[in-house]
Image (cartoon, coloured by chain):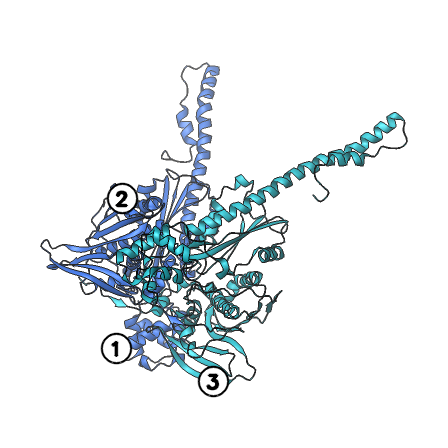
Chain colours: A blue, B cyan
Amino acid sequence: MAQATFEEISASDFFYRNRDIAGFTNPSRAVFAAIRELVENSLDAAESLKIPPEIYVRLSFEGEVGKDTQIYKLRVGDNGSGIQPRFIPSAFGQILYGSKYKLKQMRGTFGLGGKMAVLYGQIMTHQPAKVTSSTGSTKIYSFKLMIDIQRNRPIILDRKVLVNKEQWRGTIVEFTLEGDYLRAKSKILEYFKQTAMVNPYANLTFVDPKGRLYKFTRVTTAMPDPPKETEPHPFGVDVELLQRLIQVTPYRNMLEFLKQHFHRVGDITAQKFLEFSHLSPSKNPKRLSHEEVVRLMQNLKKFKDFLPPDASCLSPLGEELLKAGILKELKPEYLVVNQRKPSTYAGHPFIIEMGIAYGGEIPKKGNFLIYRFANKIPLLYDEASDVSFRVINSLNWRRYKVSPDMPIAIVVHICSTKVPYKTVGKEFIADRPEVRREVANALREIGRQLHRFLSKREHVDREKRRLSIFAKYLPKIAQFSSHLAGKEKLPDVKKLIKSVQKYGEET
Amino acid sequence: MAQATFEEISASDFFYRNRDIAGFTNPSRAVFAAIRELVENSLDAAESLKIPPEIYVRLSFEGEVGKDTQIYKLRVGDNGSGIQPRFIPSAFGQILYGSKYKLKQMRGTFGLGGKMAVLYGQIMTHQPAKVTSSTGSTKIYSFKLMIDIQRNRPIILDRKVLVNKEQWRGTIVEFTLEGDYLRAKSKILEYFKQTAMVNPYANLTFVDPKGRLYKFTRVTTAMPDPPKETEPHPFGVDVELLQRLIQVTPYRNMLEFLKQHFHRVGDITAQKFLEFSHLSPSKNPKRLSHEEVVRLMQNLKKFKDFLPPDASCLSPLGEELLKAGILKELKPEYLVVNQRKPSTYAGHPFIIEMGIAYGGEIPKKGNFLIYRFANKIPLLYDEASDVSFRVINSLNWRRYKVSPDMPIAIVVHICSTKVPYKTVGKEFIADRPEVRREVANALREIGRQLHRFLSKREHVDREKRRLSIFAKYLPKIAQFSSHLAGKEKLPDVKKLIKSVQKYGEET
C-alpha cells in the first residue's frame, strides 16, 4: 500500500489553491473583492499621511469569457503615501509580505488583499499587473509584474523610471481579471455608498464598464488623527508574544521590560504587578525559564489593576460623525448612538460604536436592518455569521418593547488595532467573547434608550387620544351648558384643555 | 512623515496572528476545532489503507486558567497508516507542509488543521506536543515537538525509538491546550454523533474530562473503496495550472499532453478538441506562447464534447447508506434521497447527495433542520453562510406545497476532490455557481417527490374523512331502513364502503 507523500507549498500556492478563503469565490464576488481590497489600501495610504483621500476606480470591459463572465481591466489610483521603489515588486507580488503586520488600526490587516487581487487576475487572464507609484520625490516608478506562485516571489517584467515634474504622489494599480460585474454591481455601489458614509473626508470616484460615473464627494476636509502604532496590552498576551518580546528586548530587568513593551504599564503598575507575581524587578527577562514565562502570561491575565487600553491609538468614528452619517443615509424618526469605552481581546484594544435608528424612512422588513463596519470599512457579505448579527438576534427584545417587525436599523462599528475577522476576505467578525460582551452591552444601552423613547411615545399617543376626546367634546359641552344656562358668551375651554395636558406642546 | 516599512512573515506566523480564520476563535471553538481536525486526519489515515478506523479521543482536565477557560490535555490515537519518521516533525510542526495537496477526496484539504491545533496549544500553554507513530514496521517513533513560529519550522525536543513487538500501526498525538469544554460539549458530542452517522464503518471512542465514555460503534466493517487521486478535468482549469503541467510534462506533443494530464480525455476527444482549437496534435506544449496558453485555457472551457467527470475517483455515501443513516438518526415518516450525477467546478469533480425527511420524530421548528456534510464530515458552525442554506432558503417552496413550519429535515452531502470551503476552519461551503446549481437541482428533485407524497397524503386524508363519514352513517342508514322495511337481518354495508374506497388498505 502506498505511503503518504509529503510536500511543502508556498504561501502563494496556498492561496492560489484556496482562493475561496480570501473572498475570490465566484466571478461576482471576485470583482467586488478586488475593488474593495485596492480601495482599502488606498484609503490607508492616504490616511497615514493625514491627507484627504482622492481615489479613482475604473472598471473597463475587455472581452467575453462565458455567459456570465467577462474580462475587465481594473484601475485604482490614489493620492496616498506612495511606495518606495524597492518595496513595490514584493508589495504586489509576494504573499505574506507587507506593511500591515503591526498593532495599528488599519483597514487591511492580512497584508494579503491587494496581492490576492493581482494573483487572481493573473490566474484567470495571465496578464501582468502594472504598478505606478511615487512618494512625491523627483521620480515616478512603474513596474510590470507577475507572481511566481510556486516560489512566492515577484517576477519583474518591466521597470520604468519617469521624471516627476508635477510632484505627484500616490499609487496606481492596473490589472485584468475575470468577473461578473452585472451581478456584483449592486454590492459594489452599496460598498462605495457605505464607505463614503464613514469616510466623509474622502473623494471616491467610480467609473463602471458602461462608462457611468459615480462620484462620492467629501463633505469635510478635516481629517481624524492617523491611528498610532501601539504596544500590546497585558490582558490576553500569549506565550509566543512574550517570548518574542524577550528575544528582542534591549532591557535587562523586568521593571523596564514591562514598562517599555506593554500598553499603559507605568512604574507603579509594573511594580505592583511584579509584587503580585512574586518576581524581582531586577530579574533579567532573558533568564526566565519556560515555566516562568507561562506563569508570567497567566499572571498578566489575572492581575486586576492594569489600566484599560488607551483609545488614543484607535481612531473611532465618534458619536457625532456616526449620528451624522446615519441621519444622512437613513433619515430615521429617532436615533440614539453609543460609543463604548475601549476594551481589549487577546491584547488588542478595540472600541464598539453603535447606533439604533427607528422609523422615518427606515422600511419595515420583518427583521432588523443591520449595517456593519470595521475600521471604517463596510462589511456586506455573510451577515448571519457575524458576531453582531448573533448578539442582536439572541437579545430578549421584548424586554425593550421592541420587535423585529418594527422599522429599525442597527449600525455597528468595531475599530481595533486588529479586527478579529473570521475570513481572510474580511466579510465578518469572529465570535470572540470580549467582542461579544461589548456588542451586547452597547446594544442593551441603546435598547434601553429606544425603550424609553417608545414608552414615552406610547404615553404621548395615549395622551393625544385622551386630549383629542376632550378637545372634541368640551366645546360641545360648553356650548350646550351655555345654551342651557341662557348665556350668550361661551366659556373658554382652551384653558381647561391645557390643564389636563400632561406633556408640552413639542410632543 | 514616516514611510511604511515592509516585512515578510512566515506561514506559521500568519496563522498565529490570524487564528480566527482557522476556527480557533474562542476557548469553546478551539477545543472543538482541535478534536475535529485530529479525528479527521485519523479517519483519512485509516481509510487510505481501507482499514475500518478505530479512533480513541481523550480530553482530560489539567488546570484552571480563568472563569471560563481551562487547560486540557488532548490525546487522539488511531489505527491508520502511520507516518514515516522523517516526515513526522514537519507534518506536525510546519504549516503548509503535508500530504493533502492532491486531487483526491480527503477530509483534510488544507494540510493545516492538525498543525493549527498543535500551534494553538503551544501558543496558549507553551507545552510541546508528543507524536508517536508507526507504519507497522519493527519500530515505533516518538517525538516531542514545538514549532518555531517565526521560521515556520519544527523544533525537535526529544526523539525516541521503541521496538514494535506487537506490530502496532497508527498515530497518537497528545498535547495541551486552553479550552472551554463545558460550552463546547454539545457541539463535540453532536460532531461525534454525525460523524458516526456518515462513517458507519468506524469505531469512535471519546472520553470527556469528567471521565464519561461515549462510544460510537461501527455497524459494518465493509469499507468503501478508498478515493483515488485524479487528474484535473478540462473544464475550469486556469492558466497557472496549464503552465505547471507544461513545465513538468514529459510529453512532447499536444495529443499526448491532453490525454495524459486531463481527466477523461481519450484519443478521440483529444483529437476533436485540437481540431476545435486549431492546434496541431504534434505541437510541442512547451513551445506554446503565453497567448496560446491563455487561448488553450479558454477553449478548454468552451469545448462542449468533454465527458463529464468520472465519479470513480470520488467516494460518495450512496443513496442506500444515506437513507440508512437518516432513518436511524431522524426516524421520519417519509424520506426521499437523491444522488446527483458528478459535476465539476474549477476542474474538480464533485457529487451532491441530498435527502429530505418529513414527519415522524422530526420536530417542528419554524424552519428546516439542515444537516450538512462534506467528504463525510459534519459541518456544524456558520450554517447561514453555507451555499446549501442559501439555496434552501431562496427556493420557492410554495410550489411544492411545503412550508418551513412543517417538520422537515434536509441532509446535504458534498463530496469532491476539493471541497470549496470558505474558511480554513472548514465550517461552510463557498457559493460556487456550479455547486449552487447542483444543490438547487437536487433540492428541486427531492422537493417534487416530497410534493407528490404530500399531495397524495392530502388526497388520502380527504378520502379517509369521506370514508369515515360513510363508515359512520351507512350502518345507521342500514339499521334504520331494515327496521322500516321490517327485516331482521341487516344488509352488509362493508362491501358498499369498500366500493367507494379509492385507495388500498395500505394507505
Q: Say what secondary structure mark 2 lies in.
A: loop
Q: Can residue B346 be seen by looking at this rendering?
A: no
Q: Which residue is mark 1?
A: A250
Residue wearing tag 2: A209
Indicate the position of residue A91 as horizontal and vertical percent values. 24, 62
The residue positioned 32% from the left and 67% from the top of the image is A232
Same subunit, labels 1 and 3: the answer reads: no
- Crowd band around label 3 with a 10 angstrom C-alpha radius: few (<14), some (14–19), many (20+): few
Q: Do the residues bearing badges 2 and 1 touch, measured as CB atoms within 8 Å? A: no
Tag 3's secondary structure? Answer: strand
Going by the numbered disc 1, the residue's amino acid type is: Pro
Image coordinates of residue B386 in percent, x first then y, are 45, 53
Specify the amino acid type for callout 3: Val
Residue B120 in sight from this viewpoint: yes
Residue A64 vs residue B504: left or right?
Answer: left
Residue holding disc 3: B161
Task: Return the chain for callout 1.
Answer: A
Disc 2/disc 3 C-alpha distance (Å): 65 Å
Q: Are marks 2 and 3 on the same chain?
A: no
Q: Position of residue A139 (x, y in %)?
A: 12, 59
